[in-house]
């Protein structure tokens, strides 16, 4: 990607929010102080607000008002820099300030770029959940590496979505328009998942009563699901995070792979799971969009899952959603993903400490998040039966994953 395109990703608020959805939420352009003079973003100074989050409600989001300045130097190098405005307009109980942070973008090779990123923040971490204190206090959870990794992922996604169709598993050929629709639906699913589980001020989380087995559970209501011909229902989102003493890669492989899905997925238990097709995203073959088929017998399909799995040095995720067979058929023939309702669930994996921090091996922090449609509850009342189902799903899934890791079950 050339420097100008990266500059546009950062300076165009809509593109910034769309590209960095795993890092920022509630982004707003509050005003432009200095306009560009040559048709580019050179010299533009704008005031923005955003919330910076991680992929769990247990880490508080960092709210910030800041100025963003863009400058092109004589050698063609670009700089994009943020600085908090809370010092100019003091707010009570400010817990986060963005000191001068941003990136330098240099053109290299054939329309490529070298990006150097710096994060410099002042933050009050006293209210951190103990599980996440090491990874957040070290700076790793909100590090500059996340921004670089996201730009890399965006470039890989652009390459994948525009590449010519190639045969996938068992030589299956998806038409070009079907491939594009499948990737767009996967992107919609993953964005939905990240938006659902973060701790931005828009997401109001509550806890599970203490008399339940699952620990550190957070739950909230999503949007009301409306399906033609069926009664509407409230979407309930529930999540928890646990520490597992195995490397991220081991846990990621176990959760993403077809051969081990029936070890943890309640709907796949005692059933045969097969990856029908996949589309690779980038050079790592584990980063892919897949269609998983769950059979209760050789000729009976119980469930189709759309799944995206992705890993880099900052973390991993596996996001999936059940799909209607007719809806999947339309997508594979180039149907519009905007008209497909999708309820993603999945996993986010982080290291339990920064590489090189402290003694001992680096383990994993696993965040599990699920969605279900509940027609008995509303935002004022959640019946005991719903709470018991939430507790059972989380407790059973956590126990299955822990047992598999304890007994060394791998894909």
Image (spheres, rainbow, N blue to C red):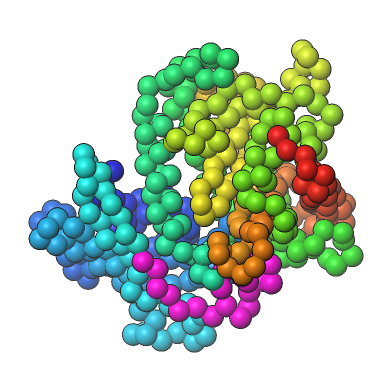
Residue 344, quarter of picture: top right
User: Does the rendering let one see residue 261?
Assistant: no
Judging depth in this view, the residue of 407 and 282 nearest the camera is 407
Judging depth in this view, the residue of 142 and 344 nearest the camera is 142
Seen at 61% across and 27% down, the residue is 291
Q: Position of residue 55 (x, y in %)?
A: 58, 57
Q: Is residue 116 left or right of residue 322?
A: left
Q: Residue furthest right?
A: 211
Q: Is residue 74 left or right of residue 399?
A: left
Q: Position of residue 205 (x, y in %)?
A: 67, 64
Task: From this view, report whether residue 325 is shown above or below residue 212.
Answer: above
In which quadrant of the rendered image does the N terminus lie?
top left
Q: Is residue 73 magenta?
A: no
Judging depth in this view, the residue of 236 and 75 nearest the camera is 75
Task: From this view, report whether residue 127 is shown above or below residue 290.
Answer: below
Residue 84, quarter of picture: bottom left
Judging depth in this view, the residue of 66 and 403 nearest the camera is 403
Q: Position of residue 128 (x, y in %)?
A: 63, 74
Seen at 14% across and 62% down, the residue is 73
Residue 86, quarter of picture: bottom left
In which quadrant of the rendered image does the C terminus lie?
top right
Q: Is residue 93 left or right of residue 408?
A: left
Q: Position of residue 37 (x, y in %)?
A: 10, 60
Seen at 35% across and 79% down, the residue is 85
Task: From this view, report whether residue 134 is shown above or below residue 244.
Answer: below
Residue stretch rendered in magenta on the structure:
118-137
Q: How many marks?
A: 0
Seen at 62% across and 46% down, the residue is 249
């Amino acid at each position: 990607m050339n420097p100008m395109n990266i500059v546009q990703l950062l300076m165009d608020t809509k593109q910034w929010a769309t590209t960095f959805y795993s890092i920022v939420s509630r982004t707003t352009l509050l005003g432009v102080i200095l306009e560009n003079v040559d048709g580019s973003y050179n010299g533009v100074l704008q005031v923005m607000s955003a919330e910076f989050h991680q992929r769990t409600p247990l880490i508080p989001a960092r709210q910030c008002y800041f100025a963003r300045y863009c400058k092109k130097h004589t050698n063609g190098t670009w700089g994009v820099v943020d600085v908090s405005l809370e010092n100019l307009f003091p707010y009570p109980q400010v817990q986060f300030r963005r000191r001068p942070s941003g990136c330098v973008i240099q053109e290299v090779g054939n329309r490529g770029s070298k990006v150097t990123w710096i994060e410099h923040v002042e933050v009050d971490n006293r209210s951190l959940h103990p599980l996440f204190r090491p990874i957040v206090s070290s700076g790793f959870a909100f590090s500059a590496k996340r921004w670089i990794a996201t730009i890399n992922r965006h470039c890989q996604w652009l390459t994948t979505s525009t590449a010519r169709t190639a045969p996938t598993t068992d030589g299956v050929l998806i038409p070009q328009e079907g491939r594009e629709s499948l990737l767009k639906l996967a992107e919609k699913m993953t964005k939905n998942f990240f938006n659902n589980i973060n701790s931005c001020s828009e997401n109001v989380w509550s806890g599970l009563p203490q008399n339940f087995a699952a620990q550190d559970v957070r739950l909230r209501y999503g949007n009301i699901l409306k399906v033609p011909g069926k009664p509407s229902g409230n979407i309930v989102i529930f999540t928890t995070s646990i520490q597992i003493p195995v490397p991220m890669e081991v846990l990621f492989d176990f959760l993403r792979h077809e051969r081990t899905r029936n070890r943890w997925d309640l709907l796949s238990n005692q059933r045969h799971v097969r990856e029908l097709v996949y589309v690779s995203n980038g050079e790592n073959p584990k980063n892919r969009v897949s269609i998983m088929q769950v059979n209760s017998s050789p000729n009976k399909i119980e469930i189709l899952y759309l799944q995206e799995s992705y890993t880099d040095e900052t973390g991993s995720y596996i996001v999936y959603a059940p799909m209607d067979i007719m809806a999947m058929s339309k997508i594979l023939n180039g149907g519009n993903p905007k008209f497909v309702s999708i309820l993603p669930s999945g996993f986010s994996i982080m290291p339990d400490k920064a590489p090189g921090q402290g003694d001992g091996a680096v383990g994993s922090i696993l965040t599990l998040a699920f969605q279900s449609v509940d027609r008995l509850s509303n935002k004022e009342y959640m019946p005991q039966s719903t709470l018991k189902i939430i507790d059972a799903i989380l407790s059973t899934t956590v126990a299955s994953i822990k047992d598999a890791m304890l007994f060394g079950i791998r894909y």
